[in-house]
Amino acid sequence: MQKLTVLAVCCSLLFVIHGQKPRPCVAPPLFEGRLITMDPSKHFEFVARFSYDAFLKRERIIGKVFTAENKTEILDTILLYRKRSMYSIFYHNKTCIKSPLTIPFRRAEIPHDATFIAQFVIGSSSLPGEGLLANSWTGEDKTQGGRYIMTATEFGCIPVSLLYNSNATGWSVTSYFDIINGIKDPEVFIPPEFCN
């Protein structure tokens, strides 16, 4: 009887421990925020606001590109994956370039085949509310032949950072911040009238 009790307790502990291991997750279907992308080898930096809609497969990115030549460019792009259309918008002269969008929509998620690296606290774990529990994952991007390390929050699967490396692009680092659930202005995905 004692052996049966010990076996039951061990099995229960195994289920609890296995249940606590982080699993790949999917970010909320609607969110917006800010990002910074850097490519140190190319002296390239991109600071932007973005909106993401997984329901209708669309994104909007508005930001500034800083290059090694001390040039700054404004980038405003609407990506409509269902319509396979991309709009590059130039407000300074009220022009718009519509071009075909050939890349597939990628959900904001930790891929199901990603390998868990570690769980950690961003900030401090000394007092409640001083830190953010996050998980890091690594894997191979089979579509582009690159490797990635992705970090997302444990609760909500909100993106925190992405390190990406491929032979074509080299290393790039993207950090996400000021994320809010939902889209404040749904019309952000509608091209301005001068695009027609």
Image (cartoon, helix red, strand yellow):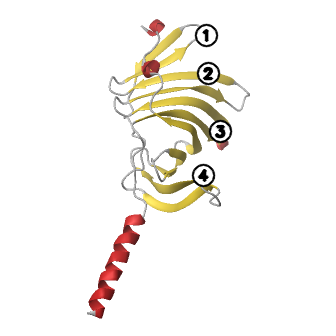
Name the side, left or right, on which 99 lies relative to 150.
left
Q: Indicate the quadrant where residue 126 lies.
A: bottom right
Q: Nearer the viewer, mark 2 or mark 3?
A: 2
Q: Indicate the quadrant where residue 85 lies.
A: top left
What is the C-alpha distance between the residues marked 2 and 3?
18 Å
Res. 42 mark: 3
Q: Which residue is mark 1?
A: 92
Mark 2 or mark 3, earlier in chain: 3
What is the C-alpha distance between the residues marked 2 and 4?
36 Å
Residue type at tag 2:
Ile
User: In the rendered image, which quarter contains the C terminus?
Assistant: top left
Q: Which residue is mark 2?
A: 74
Mark 3 or mark 4, earlier in chain: 3
Label 1 with label 2: CB-CB less than 8 Å: yes
Q: Nearer the viewer, mark 2 or mark 4?
A: 4
Mark 2 or mark 4, earlier in chain: 2
Q: Residue furthest bottom?
A: 2
